Image (cartoon, rainbow, N blue to C red):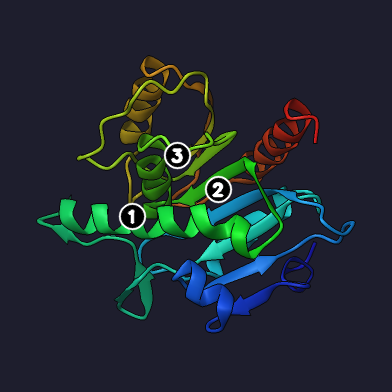
Amino acid sequence: MTPLDIMKNVALVTDGPAFDALGLVHRVRVPQGEAGERFPTLVMVHGFQGNEDVTWVFARTASPRWLIVSPRAPLASEGGYSWNSFNDGKTDSESLWQARDTLTHFIEQLADVYPVDRTKMVLLGFSQGAGMCYTVAASQPQPPLIGLVALGGYIPGPIKLPPLHGLPVFMFHGTKDETIPVSMARKNHDQLVAAGADVSYREDEVGHKVSAGGMRDLTAWLAQRLADERV
């Protein structure tokens, strides 16, 4: 699948009713279906100094059955956008909570704008975006998520994980990651297991990116989410 194929039928929303309701610029791909049909939804969250386009490489791991949406973070940051700021290399709590509320609002309003099945939602984040996914999941959204994907990411320091009751989590991390050390991912893995998550973990000898093997495992993991939910 080429980059052009991945972006086929993907709309960029910068204004209008959908933007007003959700509060963030975003890209969205809505599957074709029957009138009134609602779809399992994959929310892809980009990382530090990224934008709504950079996560679309991961759309190739999701079948055409998924409605896919990627929001742009609210903070302009050196040619891109970020979810929260940092103080002396540590996550700034105030901006993290603001970003959590902004992203949570976006997610909770999706079903009012697009044909989203709110009971079949997966959050996928890369790098800082993974941190945002952990942050939203820790606030125990209702109805609960059916899965969370953390790619090259981390659990932000201020976050305390609640009981996760078997939440399926897919983690990937590069052992040569120069941005977020693999030791952090291993620590987060143990934290998630202790909180009761059902964690699928893979690491490969790559840097701050996802390997081909990681992409294959993610494809299989997303397919299993649909099978588990009998979609």
Q: Position of residue 215 (x, y in %)?
A: 65, 44
Front position in the image: 207 or 140 = 140
- The residue that label 1 is drawn on is 101
User: Residue lying furthest bottom in this view?
Assistant: 15
Q: Residue at x 45, y 39 (%)?
A: 141
Locate residue 77 relative to residue 57 in the image: left or right: left
Mark closer to the chain start, 2 or 1:
1
Q: Dot 2: within a 10 Å radius of its alpha carbon, few (fewer than 14), some, or many (20 or more) residues?
A: many
Verify CB contact (< 8 Å) between mark 2 and mark 1. Answer: no
The mark found on residue 141 in the picture is 3
Closer to us: mark 3 or mark 2? 3
- The residue that label 2 is drawn on is 210
Report, in whole angstroms, how far the alpha carbon at label 1 lies from the one at label 3.
Answer: 11 Å
The kind of residue tagged 1 is Asp
The kind of residue tagged 3 is Pro
Locate residue 135 relative to residue 211 in the image: left or right: left
Q: Dot 1: within a 10 Å radius of its alpha carbon, few (fewer than 14), some, or many (20 or more) residues?
A: some
Report, in whole angstroms, how far the alpha carbon at label 2 lies from the one at label 1.
Answer: 28 Å
Mark 1 lies on a secondary structure that is: helix
Mark 2 lies on a secondary structure that is: loop
The mark found on residue 58 in the picture is none
